[in-house]
Image (spheres, helix red, strand yellow):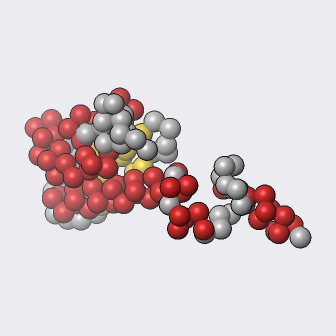
Amino acid sequence: MSAAANPATVAECLRVGTGFSQGDRNWIAEQFATLDARLASFHADATELEVSVKDREARGQKVTLECWIAGRQKIVTTSAEEDLHAALNDVRDDLRRRLNDAKTRQEPRHNKHLRDIPQPQGELDPTDEQGPERADTETA
């Protein structure tokens, strides 16, 4: 995927939800700044991030980070870490992993390793030259 004309950044796309104040926004954006490189391939107007916390600073707090990117499924990551800083890092790292996985799944034609792995029949890429051959061998 080529770089977007107006690349998404955490500072531009982040909203704070329940449990956080607008005063927390800059601190959280700094914690999530490492996501900028991963988000840069998406257009800023088509990308949204929202972080929220339930029962902040209490035992059993739950931090949730939601990511909406146009044309893709919503990604939700959560953490039950008791330390707020650790929980924010946990959801950030999980989102980065899931964005990487989603990109790899969506663009296997650029990854020789994934092209060589047989895919289930329902997920065949119409541009995959091996598709019809595999269908014939499965029915034979």
Image quarter of residue 74:
top left
Answer above or below: position of 75 versus 85.
above
- Say how many tags the image has: 0
- Residue lying farthest right? 140
Q: Position of residue 90 (x, y in %)?
A: 26, 62
* Picture quarter with the N terminus: top left
Q: Nearer the viewer, residue 42 or 134?
A: 134
Answer above or below: position of 10 versus 109.
above
Image quarter of residue 12:
top left
Instruction: Identify the residue at horizontal 20%, vertical 38% (top origin).
Output: 11
* Picture quarter with the C terminus: bottom right
Q: Which of 49 and 137 is in front in this view?
A: 137
Q: Where is residue 63 in the image (x, y as percent from the top left)?
A: 27, 54
Image-based side of 80 in relation to 101, left or right: left
Whether residue 105 is visible, yes or no, is no
Instruction: Identify the residue at horizontal 65%, vertical 68% (top origin).
Output: 118
Q: Where is residue 54 in the image (x, y as percent from the top left)?
A: 27, 51
Instruction: Identify the residue at horizontal 71%, vertical 61% (top origin).
Output: 130
Q: Where is residue 109 in the image (x, y as percent from the top left)?
A: 55, 55
Q: Which of 55 and 31 is in front in this view?
A: 31
Whether residue 39 is visible, yes or no, is yes
Image-based side of 24 in relation to 81, left or right: left
Image-based side of 138 in relation to 69, left or right: right
Instruction: Identify the residue at horizontal 16%, vertical 52% (top origin).
Output: 31
